[in-house]
Image (cartoon, rainbow, N blue to C red):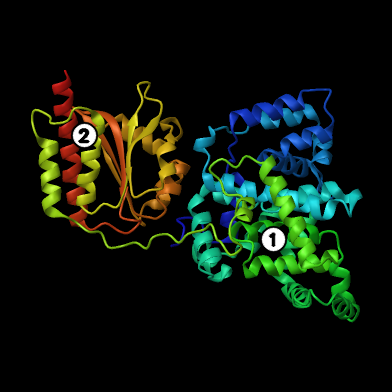
Amino acid sequence: MPLPSPKTRAQWLELLDKQPLPVTPQALQQVTRALGDSRRSLRDIGEIMQRTPTLALCIMREANRSASALGEPCAHLETALSRLGLERSAQLISRQPTLPIEQIPRQLRQILLISQHAAQQANGLFAGRLARLWQEINWGSILFLAPLWPLVAAHPEFFDEWEQRVLLNGEQACKVEKQLLGVSLPSLCLALAEHWRLPEWIIQAYRLLLTDRRLLVRALHIARDNEHPLQQQQCLDQDNNLSRWLTHPANSVLLANAIALSAHHCWSGSHSLRWQQLTGLYLQASIGELQQQIHQQAAVSARRCDTEQLWHPAQALLWPWDAVHLRPNVASAPAKTDAQQWRLLCAQLLQSPSAFSNTMQLSSCAIQALQAAGIQRLLLLRIDQKQSALKVQELAGLPAEAADITLLPLQSQVLRSLLAKPGQLHLTPANIAQFSALLPGPLKALFAGENLLLRSVANEGRVVMLLVADINGQPLSETQLKIFGKTAQCIDRALTSFANRAG
């Protein structure tokens, strides 16, 4: 379904240029310490900053923005650090927003991991052959997907839907992107890369995808005949324009990212094989030899990167060759209600004195009552004693890792309002654009869609929990809304009854 966002390239450009890219406090501290250490070389600092690519992007953008209109954009991070100076770079870094790692959308961390994997592929495959250009290859590869980082930070659900529809279902990427964003993704990435004055190799790669696709198609067609290198060379000799383009070092940036992104789906897929064949043509290497190198670099990347709760293609090298880690989302089944079970569970909630021995029993009964009412995805969060964080009490219909999320009311106006006094917010396509930016990223990632209910759960008027619910993103009928409201009232009364019993 379309994202509740701008639908023109200019509007997207303005929005994404302002989108903050959070980092963990630990990463910020590590980079700040390196910038202030006079014993470290610029190369040392670059290697540390590569572990947090968003900070590298911050430096590159500022260095190129501060240059004169005719100035040459920085091709790599060392040049950018020299242009800004270490003191100014440290000041710039210190202003970047920080979040605990569990608060940074998983989708953003996943695409950053893909960028780091691409950089490892580029260094392993190309930097040794083009040693004088290794920095351009390294930083061009790691920043190639940078225009996507703010998009995924603002709308983590886009990454999930793109994965499902393009990688898993095989839908045309341009069709999916136009439907979701209103513009094609390569054109948006090119516009943002030009606006930020990213390295020229990145801009050339996006222009190739947009305007020179026939050149790319001709190269891919020749690359398919990998078992006959002599015939391949003869074809290239007959097409001087194609031969000149193919041997350009800038292509290493596109090839490395194509390998990393296609491997994110599976190693044996047609997209992955196509880019491996083109890389083999570029390096004049056989598929067997190239695949061995690619798999080795993937393993190196997995050892160097933080892969906690993320997917790295190196894991699939231990699986059967045709295995795919992506699984289709369960189709949104019609909401089923069990009126008799719902009445029984509500009666249990309303029983006085309370029949529950602890709050876990109460919340479990509450979730079961809502499920009996036809609500399919549920998250019940409790506020901590300091009133500073919401942690998961119960969940249903969501991935197991959702139990680990923590929401910080300080960072969300919607959460603060719902915790200040009892209330309910019903998000629909009509108002989602108004409230989407005010919702925490992890919550938007869990509940992708335009229909969502958020309701305070109170004990004698004091909010103690927050209930988040939907029907797999589908619209709720008036009847469903009424049943949800009645169930929530039963939960409120159950909490009051339990509190009085405990007292």
Quadrant in which residue 125 is drawn: bottom right
- Measure how far apart labels 1 and 2 are at the Cα level: 50 Å
How packed is label 1: few (under 14 Cα within 10 Å), some, or many (20 or more)? some
**308 to the left or right of 419:** right
Q: Classify the position of the N terminus by image quarter.
A: bottom left
Q: Are marks 1 and 2 in contact (CB under 8 Å)?
A: no
Tell me what residue is drawn at x 76 percent, y 68 percent.
278
Task: Residue type at mark 2: give it.
Answer: Leu
The residue labelled by disc 2 is 362
16 is higher (above) or lower (below) than 85: below
Q: Which mark is residue 258?
A: 1
Task: Locate residue 161, reporting x and y percent.
Answer: 49, 59
Q: Which of the pair 429/340 is nearer the observer?
A: 340
Quadrant in which residue 213 is drawn: bottom right
Q: Is residue 72 visible?
A: no
Quadrant in which residue 347 is drawn: top left
Q: Classify the position of the C terminus by image quarter.
A: top left
Tell me what residue is drawn at x 50 percent, y 66 percent.
179
